[in-house]
Image (spheres, helix red, strand yellow):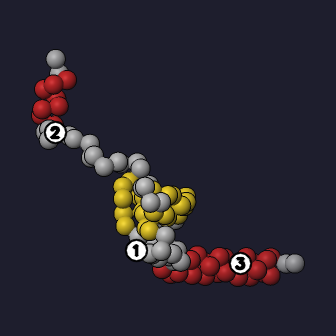
Amino acid sequence: MNRKETAKTFMYACFGILALAGAVQIVAPNAVAQSIEPTTVAAAYSVVEGQFGTYYQIAIMSNGDVYKAPLNNQNWAFQTNIFAGNNPIQNSDSSLGDVKQRFSR
């Protein structure tokens, strides 16, 4: 191959890479996962509760949400989040000046 053909081949390779990069920039922002919910089921099981043996289905999602439904009914109800629990963490409002004053001693 002579220099002219090598330069032409290199130019076409560069144009191909540029076209591919442009296509990725156009298509990539529109790419989304094919899922309705952002979380997936991490665990699912059935439970018998109460004196008369009521059967329930329990599902734990990957984000920690726990849902419960009677076995003969598909109306799932949110119960709790295993990571956060039912009691939120209590905190007090502090300004940056309060924090500086507390730790400057």
Helix, strand or loop at mark 3? helix
Q: Which mark is residue 92?
A: 2
Q: Residue at x 27, y 46 (%)?
A: 87
* Distance (Cα) linking label 1 and label 3: 57 Å
N-term mark: 1 or 3 = 3
Residue at label 1? 75
- Give the position of the N terminus as an image quadrant: bottom right
Per the image, label 1 sits on a secondary structure element best described as loop
Query: Is the residue marked by circle 2 packed among few (<14), some (14-19), or many (20+) residues within 10 Å?
Result: few
Pick the residue in front: 66 or 15.
66
- Report whether 53 appears left or right of 81: right
Q: Which residue is at a point 44% across and 68% down the rendered structure image?
A: 70
Distance, label 1 to label 2, CA atoms, is 38 Å
- 58 on left or right of 105: right
Residue 95 in percent (x, y) is at 13, 39
Q: Tags 1 and 3 in contact by the CB under 8 Å rule? A: no
Measured as percent of width and height from the top left, residue 29 is found at 47, 76
**Disc number for residue 13:** 3
Q: Amino acid at mark 3?
A: Ala
* Amino acid type, label 2: Ser
Q: Nearer the viewer, residue 35 or 32?
A: 35
The mark closer to the camera, 1 or 2, is 1
Secondary element type, mark 2: loop
Q: Residue at x 19, y 23 (%)?
A: 103
